[in-house]
Image (cartoon, helix red, strand yellow):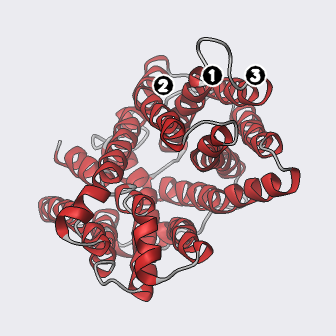
């Protein structure tokens, strides 16, 4: 139970500190005199730092032990948030990169800890911490501007999110004191030659591209069709809300049935149908685009925990789980950093959004190929999977 509390406390910090920046972007640019490209590059740098953190996370976990490394990684998030409290360009960029690195390392090691301590409920726990991430992100993005007004500036609004990160550090400090010392382990290499790891990475690339591509371009698509910015923002709210039940229900169904492929195919179908709807029939009478956006959001919410659940089930031990998830998340975050940029280039070249949205169909295609390649993965016996009773 304490490990589960620690996972949820940490998960609240895995998107929130980065979600505080976009609502304050205008204030940051005005205060520091930044061009739009420079201000945007700060967030892109965070996503690429998440990719780097994911790729090195298994080695960090092998060197320090998963629990110690998790405490250190969320400590890095807290430190980066504090550094962003200095209202200058260099601390803003440096602190954001530190947060990205901490988030990337944490995401990898969470899979290892779930495999080691909670293997018999891997997908459900993965869904729970994805929901915690979403809740943290929603609360932080909603509170960013009011906090800037109340605390006297954007830098204070960014720095205050060091507090929940420090709370997570405190919880993991208790876990480290209460558990046995982790045995020394040989650093784990990323399994680039392993077929399962490549398929998991392909699936994660599709999920990440769908998440960040739709987050970036759904609202502009409808603003271009004459919607107000406020109304288009409500579409993103629906997109976010749809992820919450998906992140809980779909992993639970996979765990309940012991089958992954049917539910992964549902995710692919939701993405494809929602994106095709936006392209072919963007505003159906009476219902408008809300159904399309809900389907895409549902797919975004379900894809991530399903993939991490499969990795936790299939990996032979916690170190292999960390290495495989590190490779998958590293590939996914790299695609997430570059995919929205490609979509923007297509918007500029075609003077429309249809070609850009087709990139999301390509993301669904990646998930489909990976799902068919992975097969109908059945849940292993919890004891043989590396549960605490092993």
Decide which of 26, 174 is in the foreground and name it: 26
Q: Which mark is residue 58?
A: none
- Whichever of callouts 2 and 1 sits on the residue coming sooner in the sequence is 2
Looking at the rendering, which quadrant does residue 376 occupy? top right
Q: Residue furthest right?
A: 350
Callout 2–callout 1 Cβ contact below 8 Å: yes
How packed is label 1: few (under 14 Cα within 10 Å), some, or many (20 or more)? Answer: some
The x and y percentages for residue 367 are 70, 38
Quickly name the residue at label 2.
250
Q: Secondary structure at mark 3?
A: loop
- Whichever of callouts 3 and 1 sits on the residue coming sooner in the sequence is 1
At a point 16% along the width and 61% down the height, the residue shown is: 167
Left or right: residue 122 compared with residue 379: left
- Mark 3 vs mark 1, foreground winner is 3
At a point 31% along the width and 70% down the height, the residue shown is: 154
How far apart are labels 2 and 1 at the CA level?
9 Å
Callout 2–callout 3 Cβ contact below 8 Å: no
Looking at the rendering, which quadrant does residue 191 occupy? bottom right
How packed is label 2: few (under 14 Cα within 10 Å), some, or many (20 or more)? Answer: many
Residue 289 can be seen, yes or no? yes
The x and y percentages for residue 185 are 41, 71
The x and y percentages for residue 187 are 49, 73
As drawn, 132 above or below 299: below
Left or right: residue 98 compared with residue 8: right
Decide which of 82, 384 is in the foreground and name it: 82
Q: Which mark is residue 281?
A: 3
């Amino acid at each position: 139970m304490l490990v589960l509390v620690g996972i949820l406390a940490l998960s609240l910090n895995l998107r929130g500190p980065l979600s505080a920046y976009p609502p304050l972007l205008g204030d940051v640019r005005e205060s520091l005199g930044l061009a739009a490209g420079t201000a945007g590059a700060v967030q892109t740098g965070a996503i690429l730092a998440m990719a780097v953190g994911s790729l090195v996370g298994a080695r960090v976990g092998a060197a320090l032990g998963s629990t110690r490394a998790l405490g250190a990684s969320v400590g890095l998030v807290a430190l980066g948030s504090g550094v962003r409290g200095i209202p200058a360009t260099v601390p803003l960029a440096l602190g954001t990169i530190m947060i990205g690195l901490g988030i990337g390392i944490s995401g990898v090691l969470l899979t290892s800890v779930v495999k080691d301590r909670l293997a018999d409920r891997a997908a459900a726990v993965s869904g729970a911490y994805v929901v915690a991430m979403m809740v943290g992100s929603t609360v932080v993005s909603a509170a960013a501007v009011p906090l800037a007004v109340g605390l006297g500036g954007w830098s204070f609004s960014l720095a205050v999110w060091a507090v929940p990160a420090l709370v997570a550090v405190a919880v993991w400090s208790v876990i480290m004191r209460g558990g046995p010392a982790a045995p020394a382990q040989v650093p784990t290499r990323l399994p680039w030659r392993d077929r399962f790891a490549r398929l998991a990475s392909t699936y994660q690339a599709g999920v990440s591209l769908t998440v960040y591509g739709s987050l970036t371009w759904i609202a502009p698509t409808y603003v271009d069709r004459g919607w107000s910015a406020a109304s288009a923002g409500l579409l993103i709210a629906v997109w976010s809300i749809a992820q919450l039940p998906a992140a809980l229900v779909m992993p639970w169904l996979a765990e309940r049935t012991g089958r992954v492929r049917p539910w992964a195919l549902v995710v692919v179908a939701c993405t494809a149908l929602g994106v095709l709807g936006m392209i072919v029939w963007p505003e159906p009478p009476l219902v408008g685009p809300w159904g399309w956006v809900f389907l895409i959001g549902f797919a975004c919410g379900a894809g991530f925990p399903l993939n991490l659940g499969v990795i936790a089930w299939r990996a032979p031990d916690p170190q292999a789980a960390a290495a495989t998830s590190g490779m998958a998340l590293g590939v996914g975050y790299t695609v997430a950093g570059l995919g929205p940029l490609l979509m923007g280039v297509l918007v500029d070249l075609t003077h429309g959004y249809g070609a850009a949205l087709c990139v999301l169909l390509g993301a669904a295609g990646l998930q489909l190929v990976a799902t068919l390649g992975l097969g109908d993965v059945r849940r292993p016996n919890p004891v043989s999977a590396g549960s605490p009773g092993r």
